[in-house]
Amino acid sequence: MKRVYVNEEWCLGCHLCEYNCAFSNSGIKDMVKALKGKKITPRIHVEDDGKIHYAVSCRHCEDPLCIKGCISGALSKDENGVVAIDHDKCVGCLTCMLLCPYGSITTDENETVLKCELCMQNGGIPACVQGCPNRAIVFEEVEE
Amino acid sequence: MPINYILPEFEVERNDYRCIRCRVCERQCANGVHSYDPDGDIMLSDETKCVDCQRCVCLCPTHALKIKKNDAALRTNANWKQNTILEIYKQANTGGVLLSSMGNPEPFPVYWDKILINASQVTNPSIDPLREPMETRVFLGKKPHEITRDENGNINTELPPQVELQIPVMFSAMSYGSISYNAHKSLATAAEELGICYNTGEGGLHEDFYQYGKNTIVQVASGRFGVYKDYLEAGAAIEIKMGQGAKPGIGGHLPGTKVGADVSKTRMIPEGSDAISPAPHHDIYSIEDLRQLVFSLKEATDYKKPVIVKVAAVHNIAAIASGIARSGADIIAIDGFRGGTGAAPTRIRDNVGIPIELALAAVDKRLRDEGIRQNVSLVVGGSVRSASDVIKAIALGADACYIATSALLALGCHLCRTCQSGKCNWGIATQDPELVKRLNPETGKERLVNLLTAWKHEIKEMMGLMGINSIEALRGNRLMLRGVGLNEKELEILGISHAGE
């Protein structure tokens, strides 16, 4: 399946992916309206340590620990291999957050969990990939 | 702290409604203009540090930023212009020579913009390049005076070594050191894909780039940095740099801070040491001396590589070129006074040398008058900005053009002209690894290839409308040019008629 991959060599640590992610998932058409004055809860986040930067988002694991641990059946893998969250079923226990080895699951004030679903609902090409100024984030099929 | 007399040159205008405090501007500014104050949740700017490179403007996701010329003004004075006064303040502050980068920005005439191109109408057919073949390929090097054939009719003239270019444009010399590894990689890979050449400049050739040798011109300059047998053999041609348009008559100086491990290895000088190129070649004081170096390089490479001699366009350029053409060089490269640089004394950049258009016309005419035009190819640079500049240069007599500023613009340069600071926010004129990584060479290559592919289309279209189907047939074809708003003397030097004639 096509996944989001990050090439640390080209990641500038600009954090634009986080803002593009939050905007894309806001459902609001204007970025200013969507993000102005808000604490964003992006589904991708940039790890920075001095001169090292790289963005991390859900790896859509072959055998995801988050799904195994989900107590309400809210997390599932669809036919394309995308690990998706059903917000109606999520009870906000955050077990998945504890289990995710990449720290790629987050939550917001609605108290259900948020995770990268590869922008499936937003038109196909993930917003983080489209907005990356240095092609550090790519969306591609890689032979395992 | 004593009073700083310098007015900030630019103003940062932030549309506070649009600003979402993502702090991209802060993270991307190597000059430290932007900062965030968490107490007030506001973005602050220190515009005294701004160089107007536009990095923040381009990356701001909500287009909240504008960099404007600061309109704070000293009292208007036609003689003591604001910039003149500020330069006095700067020198009084520091006691130093003023440094600048890129090409001469002063309002001298741009002759390209005063020359118009002819087109076919009624009595001579134009050519549609989409339907008919159009040759943009050129060969640079010495051409034989005559073609002879053996008894079977086969050509038996031995052709001296040539550089083959798919379009009459090359990337001119920019050293590894003055520009980054990624900028060099972008140029090298683009040159390979385009079937043209890029030029190492005087900084030697990084070991990773030997693989692009057939698309590389290796330069031998007065500092002889990185020059050894393998280097000379790696390139498609060898260029002896006698001068540079931006700073004719002076050498170069790469500060030790930019000589990191990789640059040091490539230049073959100790890490952290200043790389100083002397003003003259200490072994060249005459055309005869130049001839010795030309033939030393030919001898070293078994007479398989054409040798280019690059000079700045200066007052007696025609006589100088005539000497070079007799020195055994295969190609003469002339760099006009608007050519760029990674650092030059401002006074020299802005006041020394002559326009490339006049130099080219004078040299081509002189070499033809002396019957030695075919001894050399002519390559011109020094602000060739578009396909139409290329066409005009060829019609004035050039075999090919060198472009560098145009190439850097394609890579993201915004001509802020502060390369000398080493803090290029676009990852081009810097050796800081954090900044170098901002130029992804894959993107860089694509953008360079796009630029020259576009120029190639335009060159073909323009040749077609003149009814010309090869660069060969356009070269020196000054009847295709007319001047507008030029005086008799300028027209005489350019060898063209005025529009309407």
Image (tube, rainbow, N blue to C red):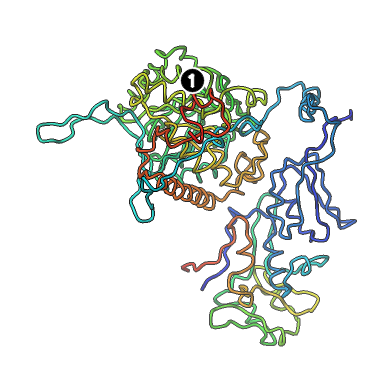
In the image, what residue occupies the spot 85% across and 32% down?
A: B74
The image quarter in which residue B82 lies: top right
Q: Is residue B390 visible?
A: yes
Give how far across and how far down residue B494 sits, in percent.
Answer: 49, 27
The image quarter in which residue B47 lies: top right
Secondary structure found at label 1:
helix
Would residue A16 appear left or right of B320 to someone viewing this image? right
Between B462 and B223, the one lying in front of the other is B462
Q: Is residue B266 visible?
A: no
Q: Which residue is mark 1?
A: B317
**B149 vs A109: above or below:** above
In the image, what residue occupies the spot 77% across and 45% down?
A: B68
Q: Amino acid at mark 1?
A: Ile
User: Seen from this angle, which residue lies furthest left?
Assistant: B151
In the image, what residue occupies the spot 68% across and 35% down?
A: B421
Give how far across and how far down residue B425 sits, in percent.
Answer: 66, 44
- Location of the N terminus of chain B by quadrant is top right
